[in-house]
Amino acid sequence: MKKEVYINSIGSVSVQKTFDSTQFLEDIVTYNDTTLKVVDPNYKEYIPPAAARRMAKGIKMSAVSSKNAMKEAGLQNVDAIIVGTGLGCLGDSEKFVSDIIKNDEQYLTPTRFIQSSHNTVAGSIALDMGCKGHNFTYVNASISFESSLWDAKLQLQANEATHILVGGVDEMVDHHVDTHRFIGHVKDKPVTMEEVLSSNTKGAVIGEGSHFFVLSNKKGKSTYSKLTSIGIYNTLEKDKIADVITGFLKDNELSVQDLDGVILGNNGDVEYDHFYTNLCSSIFDNTPQLVFKHLSGEYDTATGFGFWLANKIFKTGEVPKIVKLNDKNITEPKRLLLYNQYRGRNHSLVLLEKC
Amino acid sequence: MSNLKLELKEKIIEQLNLEDVSVDEIADNDPLFGDGLGLDSIDALELIVMLDKDYGIKLADPKEGRKIFESIDTMAAYISANKA
């Protein structure tokens, strides 16, 4: 018999003050920009200065979010660490390549090379906690985090592991933003948080963040929710998405009416937000609709923020006004569905239930 | 020589990302490794590259580094004697 999969703890560093687990979007960080950097926690409280000096930003953020998740779960170690990242520690990769060019392929130093690989975050966390179990990094663009969740879910259901630390992390770096701005994936002009989702312009506001969760096949003292199902689709025809979602729910013996809310990945890109707006005016017309990317910015693992949001809603029973897209209220959240896509590709569905 | 020592301290702080250390906190005869500044083997590689790149000094035998990188004093003396 398959075991249930529970989200037993959360840890987050994002553009909002999510590193403070006592808060739930009470003190919103607003902006008028095209790129958003994380609100830095006091890294020295989490990382020895001698270690921190070599850490890329993605590792620093993840050291904090993973430690917070482990602390809340009451664990010293886990059976596996699975991380999703679209770009890894891209900042050091860029510096390493820049050094190669600048120094005519001479004088390459080790520090930047060490951190220029995608799996540095998962490796660093494992080294820090002495975890010798399964250590894997999914680099699957905007479904990297969902791929990690799926791997963890399968392992926990099959009882191959009891506790798995699962995370998603991406850092924002200048060259990447510049190239994506050049090809129109980043908004041309600054936009405010209040206006971004209705900006009616091309591109997204780019953000960054790190979100970690302890998933277990045993309920813990701090359990947030139950991970019921995940769906990942690299390509989907625009007019088939509603059918795929209803089919996904049917596979879980549910219908749209059984959902207490849907969390959508709208990012304000006029070229692709119709994937969401079409659903909002059709199958989700009577469903409370929530959004989060105006708070987090867009990045490959931004759904980690959405996952964090869903779990905070389950835990607190509250839905902050700032995430509501329509006027339907969630009275008692029992079942939430996350739907995300990026630029019309890599669609994902994550179904969470209160437990 | 004193200018070179100051330059070395600044380079070490910048290249090894010693955010919490200031030039004034590194004495010329402080050990750079172990109990002193606390540098490690990766830092040693960074220092070898720095000698080559900034002063044109190639260490033929990396074991030499143990003596050369003992302190700012020893580094400055070695660079002054061997600078290209």
Image (tube, rainbow, N blue to C red):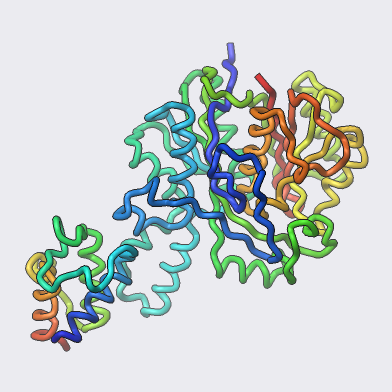
Is residue A84 visible in the rendered image? The answer is: no
The answer to whether A158 appears left or right of A341 in the picture is left
Task: Give percent across and percent down for residue A270.
Answer: 83, 59
Task: Please tell me how many numbered marks the rendered image carries.
Answer: 0
In this rendering, is residue A331 above or below A300?
above
Q: Which quadrant is the C terminus of chain A positioned in?
A: top right
- Please give the name of the residue rendered at 53% of the width and 39% of the height, measured from the top-left corner: A11
Q: Give the residue at x 48% y 63%.
A: A91
Q: Which of B21 and A310 is in front in this view?
A: B21
Q: Quadrant of residue A350?
A: top right
Question: Is residue A78 left or right of A195 when viewed as pictured?
Answer: left
Q: Residue A343's x, y, as percent?
A: 74, 54
Residue farthest to the top, as pictured: A1
**Looking at the picture, how far across and down is residue A334, in whole percent?**
74, 23
> What residue is drawn where x is 41% and y is 27%?
A75
Q: Which residue is drawn at 73% across and 47% down?
A: A341
Residue B23 appears at what percent x and percent y?
A: 25, 73
What is the quadrant of residue A284 in the picture? top right
